[in-house]
Amino acid sequence: MAFVPPDFAVPMGLETSEFRLRMLTIHDVVKDYEAVMTSREQLQGVFGPHSSWPTADLSLEQDLIDLGWHQKEFQNRTSFAYTVMSLDETRCLGCVYLYPAAPVDYDAQVILWARQSELVNGLEERLLQTLKPWLSKVWPFEQVAFPGREIDWDQWLSLA
């Protein structure tokens, strides 16, 4: 089953007065890598309790491979990774990932993170609150899960 219908126009992004959400591409590698590595400890477990990403030895080249993978999945419409950029495009502020959900009660799962330096001003929570109406109004999803945020990871993993 397809993640989104074939005729669905996948949003290329979303812009607020604070940030721009747009497709993550290989051209973002330098800014993405800097955001990831300066937030490495905080990001441990963002993809679940058993995830070791990002490791201390994550290289720029490995990040480039990851971004290329995300870009290809976006093009193939199998998952959608967005970078969260400052409006002037000088800094990566975080990322948002939309994946198919394994539990039958959900049709999408969303993982998001904001860089360490943006946590103090509450960007991660504002990002979450911006995503919810966007996902319900623009995307073809009935039930969206936010594992690790609105549903405990252990509970989420037990549903799969």
Image (cartoon, helix red, strand yellow):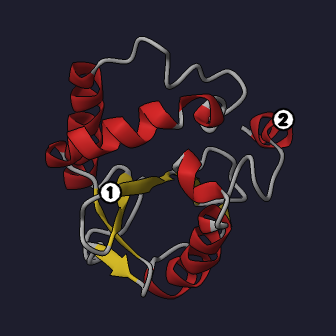
Given the current orientation, which residue lies at the most extreme top position?
57
As helix, strand or loop, the secondary structure at mark 2 comes to helix
Q: Mark 1 to mark 2: distance in Å?
A: 33 Å
Q: Position of residue 40 (x, y in %)?
A: 54, 30
At 45% across and 53% down in the image, what residue appears? Answer: 94
- In the rendered structure, the answer to whether residue 140 lies left or right of residue 77 reads right
Judging by the rendered image, the residue that carries numbered circle 2 is 154
Marks 2 and 1: in contact by CB < 8 Å?
no
In the foreground, 30 or 145: 30
Give amino acid for label 1.
Arg
Q: Position of residue 44 (x, y in %)?
A: 63, 29
Q: Position of residue 35 (x, y in %)?
A: 41, 43
Give amino acid for label 2.
Asp
At 59% across and 36% down in the image, what residue appears? Answer: 43
At 49% across and 17% down in the image, what residue appears? Answer: 55
Q: Can you see residue 33?
A: yes
In the foreground, 81 or 156: 81
Q: Position of residue 110 (x, y in %)?
A: 57, 56
In the foreground, 11 or 102: 11
Judging by the rendered image, the residue that carries numbered circle 1 is 91
Position of the C terminus by quadrant: top right
Mark found first going from the N terminus, 1 or 2: 1
When the figure is inspected, residue 111 is found, relative to residue 18, above or below; the finding is above
